[in-house]
Image: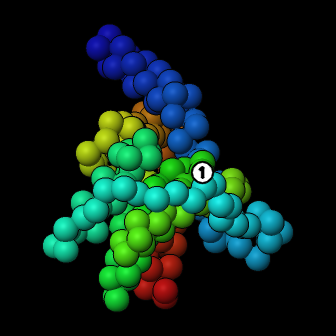
Amino acid sequence: MFGSMFSRLLRQTHMYLALLLTPWVLLYALSTLAMTHRSAFHPDFYSTPWEKVSDQVLTAQFSADATPDFMGEEILKTLDLEGNFRAVLSKDKKTLTVIRNDPVSPRQITYTPADGHLLIEKQNFAVQPFLERMHRRRGFGSFAADNAWAASVDFVVVAMIFWVLSGLWMWWELKITRSTGLVVTLSGVALFVALILTS
């Protein structure tokens, strides 16, 4: 009785998790195809030109020892563009480039400390860059949106491990499939190891 109930619960959980996480699985599948088969797509699929949004002057001045991250954060606050970013100061310290990461429309802010000039640009949407940004988006940080996505990725990882384990259980539970399943499983392991050793 218990075994039957456990088996039913396992199968339903296996199925409903798959239905729930379909968007994530499709995202990683499509983004991987886009990254590994670049030559199969039209150049426009990868085209992401920067488009000028505005020119303005930042009235605030930074001290000489201000870090790129500090300046980037303050600039984004001024522009109401708070969120995940990276900031790089040129070697001659004459230009600070701030990339405001965004899956759909990233922003690039070029700041010139000497005169406070800000050039703000956005990157037009294109399918491949969007898929790749979403594929690579991970890690917990200071922003709720990033943390929510990172938590969802953790959940997908746990679900994948569960699918493997529950799939093994369901395979072993059906005696008629044990021999064939064993051959398929060992073939998969052998192929995986062979590809690793020859890469």
Asked if residue 44 lies left or right of residue 3, the reply is: right
Whether residue 140 is visible? yes
Residue 29 is situated, as x and y percent measured from the top left of the image, at 60, 53
Residue 175 is situated, as x and y percent measured from the top left of the image, at 47, 37
Seen at 47% across and 21% down, the residue is 12
Given residues 16 and 100, the one toward you in this image is: 100
Given residues 96 and 175, the one toward you in this image is: 96
How was the colour assigned to the protein in this rendering?
rainbow
Which residue was labeled with disc 1?
Answer: 105
Q: Residue furthest right?
A: 42
Locate residue 124: give its quadrant: bottom right
Locate residue 42: give its quadrant: bottom right
Q: Amino acid at mark 1?
A: Ser
Quarter of the figure that contains the N terminus: top left
Q: Residue furthest left?
A: 65
Residue 145 is situated, as x and y percent measured from the top left of the image, at 39, 38
Seen at 51% across and 34% down, the residue is 21
Seen at 38% across and 81% down, the residue is 94
Whether residue 153 is visible? no
Q: Where 176 sits versus 61, above or below?
A: above
Asked if residue 66 lies left or right of residue 185, the reply is: left
Asked if residue 18 lies left or right of residue 64, the reply is: right
